[in-house]
């Protein structure tokens, strides 16, 4: 049953990525939308029905099986050594970030001053590090999970703090696609925990939208970064006026 559930979930992901609704699927199969919803809710798929849906989507059932197998084997984080390897070479880090965002070899070469040979060489290094699979015809398969995150306090986050944060915040955040909100107040530990839970949900939604938009042309997508942080904090300038505890 667990494997059947995983196959259905993989099928749902394909539908979402391609913008195919239950209504579209029902029309293609000659069924009512309510019938399709019941089948997905109950996961009551026959092999014949699976095959019909996959045919409509232009995929094979074996493709879904590979998706399930690949997802089960992919990590949600890199190791400290892998991240260290990336930050040691700015070009390698750039290629890694773009491949993790599902750019193709051709798209990277078109956007940056790498030759095709140089880019393939860096992709081969990423393959050796276990971050991607470099497939025939230089196709790229990412080897991290959809909910991938950098290590908390790891080499990549340290690199960001040391070299990138001033550049990121060098903006008034008043242009299209930009927004920054800063609020402060006094929260209990329980309220702080609620805020952190909302942050995890926002991060998950960001990741889901990123993968949903992969079906769009690259020209319709913008490299976007979201930073949300919360911590008990007092500015250093305020601490100078605090009374010392007895």
Image (cartoon, helix red, strand yellow):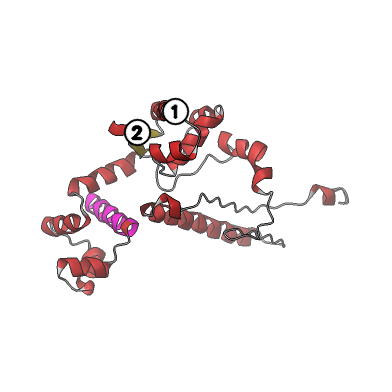
Q: Is residue 80 visible?
A: no
Please name whichever residue, 177 or 230, is drawn nearer the observer in this view of the structure.
177
Cα separation between marks 2 and 1:
12 Å
How many numbered dots are placed on residues in this image?
2
Type of secondary structure dominating the magenta stretch: helix
The tag on residue 103 is none
Q: Which residues are magenta?
A: 1-17
Q: Is residue 12 magenta?
A: yes
Measured as percent of width and height from the top left, residue 114 is found at 48, 31
- Which circle, 2 or 1, is nearer the viewer? 1
In the drawing, what numbered circle is on residue 122? 1
Query: Percent position (x, y) of residue 197?
Result: 54, 58
Residue toward you, 33 or 231: 33
Q: Are marks 2 and 1 in contact (CB under 8 Å)?
A: no
Q: Dot 1, how many residues are within 10 Å of its Cα: few (below 14), some (14-19), or many (20+)?
A: some
Front one among 104 and 57: 104
What residue is disc 2 on?
133
């Amino acid at each position: 049953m667990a494997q059947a559930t995983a196959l259905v979930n993989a099928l749902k992901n394909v539908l979402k990525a391609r913008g195919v609704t239950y209504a579209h699927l029902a029309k293609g199969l000659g069924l009512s939308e309510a019938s399709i919803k019941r089948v997905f809710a109950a996961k009551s798929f026959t092999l014949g029905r699976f095959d019909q849906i996959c045919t409509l989507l232009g995929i094979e059932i074996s493709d879904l099986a590979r998706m399930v197998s690949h997802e089960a084997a992919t990590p949600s984080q890199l190791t400290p050594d892998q991240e260290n390897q990336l930050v040691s070479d700015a070009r390698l880090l750039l290629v890694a970030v773009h491949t993790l965002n599902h750019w193709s070899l051709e798209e990277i070469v078109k956007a940056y001053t790498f030759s095709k040979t140089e880019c393939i060489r860096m992709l081969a290094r990423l393959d050796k590090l276990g971050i991607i699979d470099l497939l025939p015809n230089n196709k790229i398969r990412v080897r991290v999970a959809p909910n991938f995150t950098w290590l908390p306090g790891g080499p990549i986050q340290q690199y960001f703090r040391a070299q990138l944060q001033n550049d990121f915040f060098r903006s008034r955040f008043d242009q299209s696609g930009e927004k920054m909100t800063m609020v402060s107040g006094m929260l209990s530990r329980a309220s702080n925990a609620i805020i952190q839970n909302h942050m995890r949900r926002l991060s998950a939604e960001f990741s889901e939208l990123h993968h949903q938009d992969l079906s769009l042309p690259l020209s319709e997508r913008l490299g976007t970064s979201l930073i949300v942080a919360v911590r008990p904090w007092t500015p250093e300038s305020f601490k100078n006026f605090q009374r010392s505890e007895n």
